[in-house]
Amino acid sequence: MTMLDAYAVEAWPDVDEVWPDVDEGSRGLAVETIVRLAVGHIVQPVASPEESARRIAAITARIAYPGGRA
């Protein structure tokens, strides 16, 4: 289990209930990808912090709820 996986489990203990059909490896990859995306926007911003946050939230929702289940 990576550090990000451990954090995700601690920060979101009911993740298995929210993503019952997604295996642990895929969830870990999704969490890592979203964190790296956020860090990228911090290190090399191309938009305002508000716009970056909006865009990261939009892609996070698409990953978390494919098909618009959010």
Image (spheres, rainbow, N blue to C red):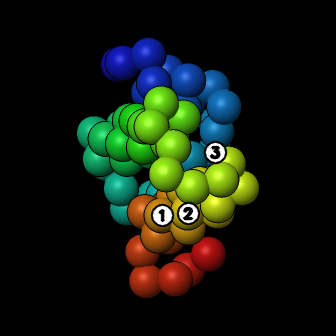
**Mark 3 Cα within 10 Å, few/some/many (few <14, many 20+)?**
few
Q: Position of residue 32 (x, y in %)?
A: 38, 35
Pointers 1 and 2 in contact (C-beta within 8 Å)? yes
Q: Amino acid at mark 3?
A: Asp
Q: Amino acid at mark 2?
A: Arg
Residue at (29% x, 47% y) in the render? 26
What residue is shown with label 1? 59
Asked whether, in this view, residue 17 is left or right of residue 64, the answer is right
What residue is shown with label 2? 55
Could one spot residue 31 in this view of the protein? Answer: no
Asked whether, in this view, residue 51 is left or right of residue 68, the answer is right
Q: Quadrant of the C terminus?
A: bottom right
Residue at (45% x, 37% y) in the render? 44
Q: Quadrant of the N terminus?
A: top left
Residue at (55% x, 63% y) in the render? 55
> Label 2 vs label 3: CA separation?
25 Å
